[in-house]
Image (cartoon, rainbow, N blue to C red):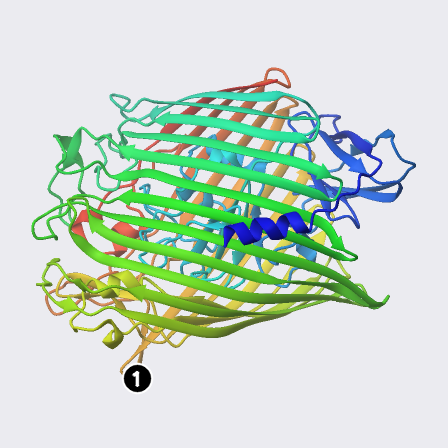
Amino acid sequence: MIKRVLLLSLLVLPIGVFAQSVVKGQVTNQKGTPVSNIIITLQGKNKTSQTDLTGFYAFNGLDSGKYKLTASGVGYQPVSKSLVLNGNEEQIVNFSILSDAGDLNEVIVTASRTAETLKDVPSSVKILNSKQIEMQRGISTDLNQILTYNIPALTLGTNTVVNKGQTLRGRNALVMIDGIPQSTPLRNGERDFRSIDPFVIDKIEVIEGSTAIYGNGADGGIINYITKKADTSKKFSSLSELSSTGSLVSPRHSFGTRFSQLFTGKVNKLDYVLSGTYEHTGVNKDADGKVVSPFQSLSETNSKNIYAKLGYNINPKNRIEVMYNYYHTLQNSSYVDSAGIYGERPITGKPGTPIGDKQGTPYNHNAYIQYTNSEIFKGTSLNVNLYLQDFYSIFEYSDFYKPAGNSAIASRKKGARFNFNTQYHIVDQVKGDVTYGLDVLNDITKQNLTDGREFVPEMNMKNFAPYAQLRTFLFENLVFKAGARYENITLGVPDYTTIPFGNYKGGVAVKGADLSYHTLVYNAGLRYSKWNLFNPFVSFSQSFSLYDLGRTLRLSAVDDVSKIETKAIITNNYEVGFSSSWKQLNVTAAYYVSTSALGSSLKDVNGVAVPERAPERVTGFEATANYTFLPNLSMSVGYSHLEGTKEVNGKKLPLPTTRIGPDKFTSSVSYSPLKAWDLSVFWIYSGSRKEFLPDAKGNYALGEGPVNSFNFFNLYTAYHFTPKATLKLGIDNVLNADYYPILSQGKVRTESYIKANGARYNLTMAYAF
C-alpha cells in the first residue's frame, strides 16, 4: 500500500518552475522587544510562518501578485499588511503588535484538519502556546502537570508516570503527536500523556468534547502535541538549556540534571530541526521530607528524547516533510514501598532493591513522511501523510499475576491519511471549503508479561474510514460546520488461554474471532463571529471508541470471543458556549452534556477492576477569563465543574472519582517588574467530592472514596541577561502544601495512597544563538 501512496504522490507533483520572491521581517511588541512564536499567515495561499526566538519570519518561493499578511498570536492583537510582488524580489515587512487578552485569531489545525482561526470553530478549544509551555516546563517537565495545570476540564494528576484518573470532561482523551495517535485504546495503559519531551513541543491544541475527526478513542476530546518547526529566517541557530532539579524540603539524594540542545535553520530549499534531551531525576520527597513511594513514580528516572524534522520545498506549491521522535524513560530506583494503609498512613519509600524489571517506557518511536500540494488543481489542496508509532511500556511488578511478574503493553500503529481541501464560492454571502479524504490505520496491540506469558492476546485492528467536513461562511459572520466519518473496522483476535490474575483463576481456553464494526458518526455546529463582545456557538458531535477491549478479553469467563461484550461506545456531545473580548478582557464559557448508551467506568469484582457497561450521562460547565491590566501585568483564571451518572438496574448512580473529578479552579498572575525580568505565580485549587457512602463495614467501593480539597502555588521567574542568555527558576508547590492527590484519596487502593511531592525547584540556564 505504501508503494501505491508514494506513486500517487509522485503523479501529482507539478513539474513547473516558478519565479520566486521572498518576504521576511521581524515582529516586535510595544516595547520594541522581539516576539517569538507569532504566526504569520499568508492569506489565500494557505501558508503560515512562525517567528523565531529573535522575532524573525520568512516566506520563500512566492509568485508575483497581491498578498495580505496577518500577524497573530495568543495574547496579541492581530495586525495585517498588504503588499505587491513583481517577481524575483525580496521585501521586508515588519510588524509591531500590541498585547490583547483575546486569542480568537489564533490559528489551529486539529479541529478540522485544516488551518482555521478559533473564532471560526463552533466548539471549545484550548491552546497552550510555546511561551506557556516554556514557562510551565521551567517549573516541571512532567507533561501530566503541564496539561492539568492549564486545561480546566482536565482532572489533576498524581505526580506519577501514568495519567490514571486524568479524564477530559469525564471521559478519555485521544493523545496525538502531530496527528499520530499515542493512546492505546485497545488496551489502555494510561501512559500517553508522557509520550514525548516538552522541549520539542511548539504548541498543544486541546479539542474538548467527543469527536471522531481522527478516529477511535476521543470520547472526551483530543490533545495534540504539535512539534517545533524550523526557523527558516537563518541558515543556522541553536538553543541550549542546562537544568538542575531537586527537593527544597529535604535535598539529600533528590538532585537531578537535565540537558537539552536544539539546532534549526534553512539552507536553500531544505529546512531542519534537530534536538536531543537527557534528564535524570533524583528522589522525590513529600512535604514532610519523606521519600515518595517508587510505585509508578517519577523518582530516579532516566529519560531521553531525540527529535528530527526535515522539510524540502520542491517548488512554491509542493513540499515534502519527514519527522522522527524517539522517547525513552525508565526508573532505576534504589527504594521499595513501605507498608501503608489506605486512609491511615501513606506508602513511602524505604531503601531496598526493587523486584522484577525496571518500569517505564523503553521506547516510543514516532515518524511520518508528509507530502503537501497547496493547489493540486484549482481551489484544491492535498496532504498525504504516512505515519507509524512503535510503543513499548513496562508496568510495575505485581503479585496479582500467578506467579508474580511485570506486564508490558506493546502497540504498533501504521497509518496513511489522504486529506483534500476544496474551496468554494457560490456568492459573496455563501462561501467556504470542504475537507475530505480517507484514513487508513493498522493498530496491533497486546499485553504480555516480560517472562513471555500471554496476558492480553494480540489484537489486530484495521480501519478504513472515509470522512468529509463542510465549512460554510454565511454573510461572512455566521459559520456553519457539519461533517461525517464512516468507521469501517475489522479486529482480529486469535485463540488464547487466560492466565490467573488476582482472584480470577484463569485457564479458560478462548476461541478467537474476527470482529467487525461499521458506524457512521456525525458532527455539526454554528458560530456567530460578528461581535468580539459576544461570539456564541452551539455544537453536536459524536465519537467512536473500542474502549479497553483488552481488559475485557483478559478476564474472559466464556470460551469464545464472539460471546464477550465487545460493542463499541458511541458518545454524543451537546454543547453551547461563547467567547467575549472587550478591550483587555477575554472570557470564554461553555456548558455541555455528554451521553453514551454504554459506559467505560471500572468496578471491583472480587478484587479485580473490570469495565462496567452501563449507560452514562456527564454534564459540565467551564469558564476562563484573562485580563491585561498593563503591558507588563496580566491575570488569568479558570474554572471547571463536572457531574456524571450511570444507570444501573434502573437507578442513577454517580460515576466514580476515577472518572469525575472535583471542582477545579486555577489562577495566575504574570508581572514584569523590569524589561528583562519576568515573574509568574500560579494557584491551583481542587475541591472536595464526597458523594458516596461506605458499606456496612465502613469500606468504600473502587473509585468512591471521599476526596478532601487541597490547593498549592507554583512560581516561575526568568531574568534575560541578554536576548540570548536567560536564567530561569521554577518552584513546584512553592509553599510546600501537604496533601494527597485526587486519585490517592478517591481510588480506595492502598498501593495508590501516596502523598504529592513537596516543594521542588527547577533551575535552568538557557542560551540561544
Does residue 38 show up?
no
Q: Which residue is disc 1 drawn over? A: 650
Classify 716 as above or below 11.
above
Classify 708 as above or below 328.
below
Rendering coords of residue 150 (x, y %): 50, 46
547 or 734, which lies in front? 547
Does residue 550 show up?
yes
Amino acid type indicated by mark 1: Gly
Q: Left or right? Give the position of 504 relative to 671.
A: left
Rendering coords of residue 545 (x, y %): 41, 66
Q: Quadrant of residue 513?
A: bottom left
Q: Quadrant of the C terminus?
A: top right
Q: Quadrant of residue 659?
A: bottom left
Rendering coords of residue 623 (x, y %): 55, 57
334 or 762, which lies in front? 334
Rendering coords of residue 657 (x, y %): 31, 60
Badge 1 crowding class, 10 Å Cα cut-off, few under 14, some 14 to 19, many 20 or more, is few
Q: Residue at x 10, y 49 (%)?
A: 399
Asked which secondary structure carries label 1, the reply is loop
Q: Residue at x 45, y 42 (%)?
A: 366
Q: Left or right? Give the position of 555 relative to 422.
A: left
Q: Quadrant of residue 478?
A: bottom right
Q: Residue at x 39, y 49 (%)?
A: 156
Q: Residue at x 57, y 36 (%)?
A: 228
Q: How many marks?
A: 1
Q: Residue furthest bottom?
A: 650
Q: Left or right? Give the position of 205 relative to 510.
A: right
